[in-house]
Image: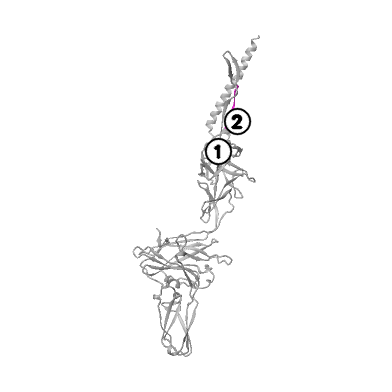
Amino acid sequence: MQVIGDNIANVNTVGFKGSTFTFQDLLSQNMFTRAGTSQVGRGTALSDIVQNFEQGSFESTGNTTDLAIGGEGFFVIREDGSDSLYYTRAGNFRFDEDGYLVNPEGYVVQGWAVDNEGNITGSTTDIALTSFTSEPEATEDVTVITNLDKDTTSNSAILSSQWDATEDTPMAGTNYEYQSTVKVYDALGSTHDVTVYYDKISGSEWEYIITCNPEEDLRAGFAGTEDAGLLARGTITFSESDGTITGLTMSRLTAPGGTDVAITVDASPATTNPDSVNITVNNVETVLTNGTVALSYTTAGGWAGTGVTSVSPTQATVDYNSDGVVEFTIDLNEAPADGDDISFTVAGATAASWTPQTTADINEEGFYEFQADFIGGTATNTTQNLALDIGTRWNGTTQVPDSLATTQYASSSTTVYQSADGYGAGALQGVDVDVDGLITGSYSNGQVLPLYKLSLAKFQSVTNLKKEGGNIYSETRQSGEATTSLPGTNGLGSIAPNSLEQSNVDIANEFVKMITTQRGFQANSKIITVTDDMLAELINLKR
């Protein structure tokens, strides 16, 4: 009756496992009969009380940290202030004021810490939210998928030469065909706009430049220059037959340019005085303005020339994708005299340093990378590499378009898809647990980050576990040592979040047991009254 009463009392206890009992007869007494010696039983006694670990039913709750185990296994918990481990099926857990996941008695739930990919690291430990903030993650990949209008014409002979960070609008709208802007993050979580400008060169070849806000470009030496905010440039080649990408190049801008350079020509002796002057520069795209070289001259001596007749090559013949070295031939309308000096100042003749990227510079994913520095640290390198994905990747031999890729079709230029990884700092808003026991945190920056994985334990003999009260058990020598593993592995059950396992006590069955026990006791007690009547009759014989 005590076992039955305990079962009924815990019919609503979370995770409770009911007990069953069995009886056995006692040693018998030998008696002499006319047939010889016979045995007479001496009664009965409890044989064993065994817990029934059958699965209890689940009840849904509104709490994400209410957990149930569907199958075998126990949650592993640690007593606060001790290294002793205990085990329970009751998953009514909560986070306490210190961020620990605990049961109502304050025992700390155990699990494994995980990395950003959800892989476990180290051994089992307390599940605790030590930080309620998601650290920012700098952008590493920028994806910009566009369609560039096949029927457009070139707006600028060299797109990168049209960028001027000293102007209120660094890139005038008349100098390019299309632009697309995407938001990226630095290592501290600040956001920055990166804009890709496109312009047609001719046929199926386009050029592009990658830029940022000049005020946010903190690369050394770029502040205040015309090249501030200009990060990279390159070309895109499309197939003339189907408009897909067949080639891609990129060059990083690693040093600003644009300083005027004076070049002096000494015309001496008179017999070899030239009627033209050759000037070599390596950044033709910078010194060209409106199809001609932007230059001026001063003279010393007696030269009386009235100016420059012509300059070649003109802007239309410039190929800045060659070795970058161009010789300008300046025709003079009058040959200098002996001893005359002519100083030509070529505007912007010092070259911005463009570093072409080769296939060896392509990252493991098959993308070219450009560089930016939005932080401007001096003690450490704060430059970040950003991979540009326009829908094609290098496979080791050639550029292979993805299923979603930049195209050149005869329709308006438009952005098909754009994205960038990375994120800013975020505050923890909620915690979720999946069926595999992975605990994830949902943050205000939109990130869902893995935090821990629950550990479950199993025993060779669960019926020999010791009940410690409070719905917890401890291992014994008879139960064997606990074997811990992940939910859903090694024969362990899976996790049912937002649920609690109810008591497996069947109250109807317990009431039937109560009745049969009562009737058994009632029938057995009749032996006493009948024996008393027999003794009374024996005594009455004397009368």
Q: Secondary structure at mark 2?
A: helix
| Residue at (57% x, 43% y) in the render | 76
Residue nearest the observer in this picture, 300 or 458: 458
Q: Nearer the viewer, mark 2 or mark 1?
A: 1
The residue that disc 2 covers is: 2
The residue that disc 1 covers is: 460
Give the percent coordinates (x, y) of residue 343.
Answer: 48, 84
Q: Is residue 9 left or right of residue 263?
A: right
Ranked by sequence position, the earlier of labels 2 and 1 is 2
What range of the chain is rendered magenta?
42-49
User: Looking at the picture, does residue 221 appear above or below residue 395?
Assistant: below
Residue 317 in view of the camera: yes
Give the percent coordinates (x, y) of residue 243.
Answer: 36, 63
| Residue at (58% x, 34% y) in the render | 9
Give the percent coordinates (x, y) of residue 38.
Answer: 58, 17
Name the residue type under label 2. Answer: Gln
- Residue 66 image-quadrant placement: top right
Say few, some or many: other residues with alpha carbon within 10 Å of mark 1 (under 14 / 14 to 19 / 20 or more): few
Task: Specify the farthest residue to the left.
Answer: 241
Give the percent coordinates (x, y) of residue 446.
Answer: 51, 55
In the rendered structure, find residue 259 and report the number of the disc placed on it: none
Residue 126 in view of the camera: no
Q: Is residue 311 left or right of residue 132?
A: left
Residue nearest the observer in this picture, 16 or 123: 123
User: Looking at the picture, does residue 133 appear above or below residue 254?
Assistant: above
SS majority, magenta:
strand
Mark 2 near mark 1, Cβ–Cβ under 8 Å?
A: no
Q: Secondary structure at mark 1?
A: loop
Residue nearest the observer in this picture, 454 or 533: 454
Name the residue type under label 1. Answer: Gln
User: Looking at the picture, does residue 543 appear above or below residue 400?
Assistant: above
**Quadrant where the image shows the C terminus:** top right
